[in-house]
Image (tube, rainbow, N blue to C red):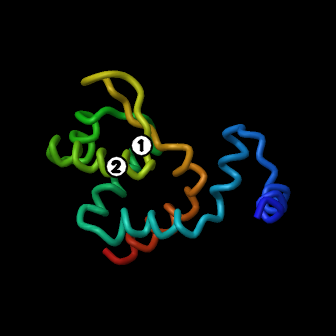
Amino acid sequence: MFFILSLFMHKIPFSGRQEDFALIMVNDPDAKRLLWFIFAGSRGGLNRLKIISKLKENPLNTNQLANELGLDYKAIQHHIKVLEKNNLITKAGEKYGVMFFISTFLEVNMETFEEIEGKLDKSK
């Protein structure tokens, strides 16, 4: 078994740097399924898609997102929790000053996100 693992490890050089980790995540079919489920396969997916679209432009806090999108503050909080739990956004700051950013995981899978965004826009 060690021999098999060592062969596998030689096929994917990994130094532990974030850039290398991002390269491993690129063609992950599980990531594609996750993004489809979060944005197209569950209630609130369109609102989560709108949140990510706003965060792609610039980091915002919960209140700013609620104002920009015309959604209830509590609804934004719920969607933020879902997005954080699924590693699609990250945060910096504390309490009311918390700013949200798109995650490295989402940046790496941005092509899939934009594909989903385009298909959902066409279906409206």
**For the point 77% across and 41% down, which residue is it?**
15
Q: Position of residue 4 (x, y in %)?
A: 80, 65
Q: Position of residue 49 (x, y in %)?
A: 36, 57
Local SS, label 2: helix
Residue 36 shown left or right of residue 112 in the figure:
left
**For the point 44% across and 74% down, which residue is it?**
119
Contact, CB < 8 Å: mark 1 with mark 2?
A: yes
Residue 11, picture quadrant: bottom right
Amino acid on which the number 2 mark rests in the picture: Ile
Mark 2 crowdedness (10 Å alpha carbons): few <14, some 14-19, many ≥20? many
Number of labels in the image equals 2
Local SS, label 1: helix
Quadrant location of the C terminus in the rendered image? bottom left
Asked if residue 60 is positioned above or below residue 124 in the image, the reply reads above
Q: Nearer the viewer, residue 57 or 96?
A: 96
Which numbered disc covers residue 55? 1
Amino acid on which the number 1 mark rests in the picture: Leu
Q: Nearer the viewer, residue 69 or 93?
A: 93
Q: Which of 45 and 54 is in front in this view?
A: 45
Q: Where is residue 21 in the image (x, y as percent from the top left)?
A: 67, 47
Q: Distance between the residues labelled 1 and 2?
A: 6 Å
Q: Name the residue under label 2.
A: 51
